[in-house]
Amino acid sequence: MNQIETKQRQIEYILPHLRLEQLEMVLAFTEFVKKRTTSQSEDELLWSFVEREQAYRAEHPDEVFVVDSEEGLLAALDAAQ
């Protein structure tokens, strides 16, 4: 039996002995853990986009421009036309 199966059996043994309030807490905690795990995966995906953008900017500095105001953005857009 592997570790996952062992933990699952322990949980299955304990759950029937819990009161309703405790079961609600267990459910809330497992939903939190599941959401946090999903969020971490999403965070990793988003960070990979940031890293790719940073790498692109480093490789192509002449293709990237930064504006710091609305007027600067409008001027850059007008210049691009």
Image (cartoon, grey):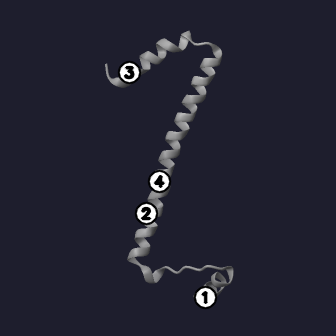
Q: CA distance from mark 3 to mark 2?
A: 37 Å
Q: In terms of sequence position, does the residue under pointer 1 or pointer 4 come before the other?
A: 4
Q: Which mark is residue 51?
A: 2
Q: Label 1, on which residue?
A: 81
Amino acid residing under circle 3: Glu
Q: Label 4, on which residue?
A: 45
Q: For the residues carrying marks 1 and 2, which lies nearer the camera in this image?
A: 2
Q: CA distance from mark 3 to mark 4?
A: 30 Å
Rendered position, 7 above or below 69: above
Q: CA distance from mark 2 to mark 4?
A: 10 Å
Quadrant of the rendering where the N terminus is positioned: top left
Is label 3 in contact with label 1 (beta carbons under 8 Å)? no
Q: CA distance from mark 1 to mark 4?
A: 34 Å
The local secondary structure at tag 3 comes to helix
Q: Which mark is residue 5?
A: 3
Taking the spot 41% from the left edge, 21% from the top edge, the residue there is 7
